[in-house]
Amino acid sequence: MHAATPILSYHAHVYYDPVDTRAAADALRQRIGDRFSVQLGRWHDLPVGPHTASMYQVAFAAEVFASFVPWLMLNRAGLTVLVHPNTLAPRDDHLVHALWLGPPLALKEDVLPLRIDAKDESTIVPNTAPHLAPWS
Ligand code: ZN
């Protein structure tokens, strides 16, 4: 029997430029929602939290990773995406355990807590209605 993974969920943060690449980010967002059971977060034209560029968040369960992340690798439309696990250690999750699709961006380390309680970890409630196969 395997020990439970400490990864509770994942985030993909899709970065864009409000002028130059917002349309591409919007098209990607639509394509994601058509294909994957994920929770699409709000648009943040102004950087929030540790992020230093405009972005929206895609939250997804661990079991979605194997279909979603490979798809995102090939379909990110030139946008930079940060994929990080959620293990209750936000600083390491973003700075040590993350993977980047496209050129990495700077993150504000000092606003990332070292540890959070499980009760502070947000529950993923998918808000998409997938109706296409991933590779369609
Ligand atoms: Zn995140």
Image (cartoon, rainbow, N blue to C red):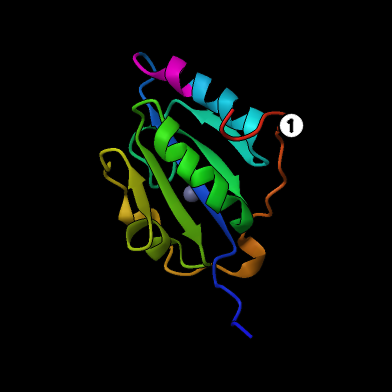
Q: Name the residue under label 1.
A: 129
**Residue 126 visible in this rendered orientation of the protein:** yes
Q: Nearer the viewer, residue 69 or 121?
A: 69
Dot 1 beta carbon under 8 Å from ligand 1: no
Q: Nearer the viewer, residue 127 or 117?
A: 127
Instruction: Say whether residue 99 is magenta.
Output: no
Q: Which residue is pictured at 74% across the width and 31% down the height?
A: 129
Region of the chain picked out in magenta, as a range = 20-25
Taking the image as shown, residue 131 lies to the left or right of residue 13, namely right
Q: Residue 74, percent across and down?
A: 41, 34
Q: Residue 44, percent across and down?
A: 48, 30
Q: Which residue is pictured at 59% across the width and 69% down the height?
A: 117
Secondary structure under the numbered disc 1 in the rendered image:
loop
Taking the image as shown, residue 127 lies to the left or right of residue 87, namely right
Q: Which residue is pictured at 58% across the width and 31% down the height?
A: 32
Extreme residue in the front direction: 136
In the depicted structure, whether residue 32 falls above or below residue 23: below
